[in-house]
Image (tube, rainbow, N blue to C red):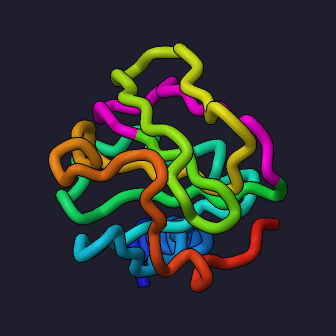
């Protein structure tokens, strides 16, 4: 077999393996009767990368950040191309506050009191559905434990 073809196939296999290892699990969450497909960032590497470099995200899709402990966690948008809204939630899944975030900025957007989770969705997603602080999200019990 041609050496170039072998090298190309090996490179593709390694690239596919790296993508598979970095792929995040997806769980279903609910906010009232609204369904969310959430990728789960439950380890340091996935939490650091988040939604960076994504060009688009389907309307019902988001990213759930699972933190090791409750704290006034903050998010920023370095290398993130999509405008997002983030809902910070306590350990019971109740929304603490929701912040809108603009692409490629380093402004801190923080939980107003200790949060265990943060859910990023396309900007305006929560407001368009009338979801506000105090509302509890369902399905968080399916989230992997933080690492």
Give percent across and percent down for residue 83: 29, 31
Give percent across and percent down for residue 111: 62, 35
What's the residue at 83%, 55% (across, down)? 69
Quadrant in which residue 82 is drawn: top left
- Toward the viewer: 118 or 21? 118
Give percent across and percent down for residue 63: 45, 57
The C terminus appears in which quarter of the rendering? Answer: bottom right
Is residue 131 something one can see in this rendering?
yes
- Toward the viewer: 21 or 33? 33
Magenta residue check for 34: no
Give percent across and percent down for residue 40: 54, 67
Q: Considering only vertical position in the picture, is 76 above or below 40? A: above
Magenta residue check for 84: yes
- Residue stretch in magenta: 70-85
- As drawn, which residue projects farthest toward the front? 134
The N terminus appears in which quarter of the rendering? Answer: bottom left
* Relative side of 43 to 140, left or right: right
């Amino acid at each position: 077999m041609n050496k170039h073809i072998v090298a190309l196939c090996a490179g593709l296999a390694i690239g596919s393996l790296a993508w598979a290892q970095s792929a995040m699990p997806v769980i279903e969450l609910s906010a009232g009767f609204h369904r969310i497909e959430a990728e789960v960032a439950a380890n340091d590497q996935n939490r650091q990368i988040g939604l960076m470099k994504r060009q688009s995200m389907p309307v019902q899709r988001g990213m759930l950040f699972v933190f090791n402990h409750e704290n006034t966690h903050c998010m920023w948008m370095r290398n993130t191309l999509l405008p997002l809204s983030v809902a910070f939630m306590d350990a019971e899944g109740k929304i603490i506050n929701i912040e809108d975030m603009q692409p490629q900025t380093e402004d801190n957007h923080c939980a107003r009191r200790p949060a265990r989770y943060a859910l990023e969705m396309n900007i305006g997603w929560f407001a368009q559905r009338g979801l506000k602080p105090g509302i509890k999200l369902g399905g968080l019990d399916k989230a992997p434990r933080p690492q």
